[in-house]
Amino acid sequence: MGLEHVLGLDQISGSNFAYQHHTLQRCLDDMAGLGRTKVELWGIAPHLHIPHVESAHLKKVRSQLSERELSVACLTPEQVAYPVNIASREDWLRDHSLQLFLRAAEVCSELEAPLLFLTAGRGYEDEPTELAWARSAEALQTITQRAAELGVGCVLEPLQRVESNLVTDVSSLRSMLDDVGSSTLGVVIDTVAMTAAGDDVSDYAKAFGEDIRHVHLVDGAPTGHLAWGDGVLDLDEILRDLSRLNYSGALTFELFGDGSYALEPRPAVERCLEAVKARLTTLSA
């Protein structure tokens, strides 16, 4: 098939997405039990609420990870559902949000996580977009600079248009990376946001190449962040295109759906793993 690099199941990182109603210990037990060696940590309360996390709690999390021979692939502070917005016109909210990410960079360093996950925020719908864009770019410059000082890289994900009016597709993502101008800021592919924007993996490959450093591999109908098989996205095509890209980073199942996954998250993760395993076997044949 002309693929230089076929993705491996070992690139699938575990996560606490969909585990918000379970203890972090339960989540990490499941991830280790499912053969994962890395996890993407979603920074939510009470698992890892960035504004309030203290050294004692971080020590406990490090111990829980170490006991299960797990490491952190990426730290993803909650920044859509919570009042977090680095592009806000309100000084108090923008400053609060900036401080959250600066603290998150420190948490990344303490957890030895190589990547801090970022989004661009949003402006008011009834103000000129360029004003919020400038606020976002300035904040991203500050965050990426501080993260770099701590030895942490950053990745930026486009949001769906209902979530942001700034970075929502390949074109706006390219523009924001150019404006921020940081060599340590890479790109996230979220397969649902990508599909909602009318983009595909090949579009990302052309625009960003090796700057693609993290992937949220999730099904959708076409949106919804569903387990594979519950949506309509083409997993074969996505994995084939990522292989052609020689993508070697982590892939995470960011499961939310209608909320039902949060009641029994492990079966949904298992179904995702089985779906990807079956496709990878076909790709490597």
Image (cartoon, helix red, strand yellow):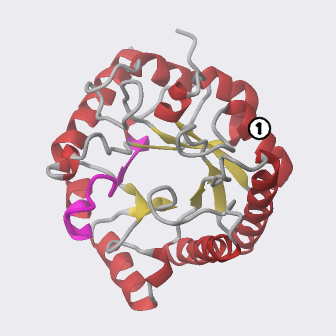
Q: Residue furthest front?
A: 126
Query: Which image quadrant for residue 9?
Result: top left
- Looking at the image, is 163 positioned above or below residue 131? above
Q: Secondary structure at mark 1?
A: helix
The percent position of residue 187, horizontal first and vertical second, equals 65, 44
Q: What residue sits 28% from the left and 52% below the top?
A: 18
Identified by mark 1, the residue type is: Arg
Residue occupying the point 70% across, 38% down: 210
Residue 101, x across and y down, in percent: 61, 70
Q: Is residue 183 visible?
A: no
The picture places residue 164, in percent across and down from the top left corner, at 60, 45
Relative side of 229 to 285, left or right: left
Vertical side of 224 occupied by 127: above or below = below
Q: Range of the magenta residues?
A: 10-27
State whether residue 251 appears in this view. yes
Between 194 and 279, the one lying in front of the other is: 194
Q: Is residue 249 magenta?
A: no
Q: How many marks?
A: 1
Residue 150's place in the image compared with 246, above or below, is below
Judge from the rendering whether residue 121 lies leftward or rightward of residue 252; answer left or right. Answer: right
Q: Residues within 10 Å of mark 1 (few under 14, many from 20)?
A: some
Q: On the picture, is 238 further left or further right than 34?
A: right
**Going by the image, does 205 lie left or right of 271?**
right
In this view, the residue in front, 112 or 255, is: 255
According to the image, label 1 marks what residue?
174
x%, y% of residue 229? 26, 24
User: Residue at 29% of width from left, 23% of height from top?
Assistant: 278
* Quadrant in the picture for residue 41: bottom left
Residue 11 painted magenta: yes
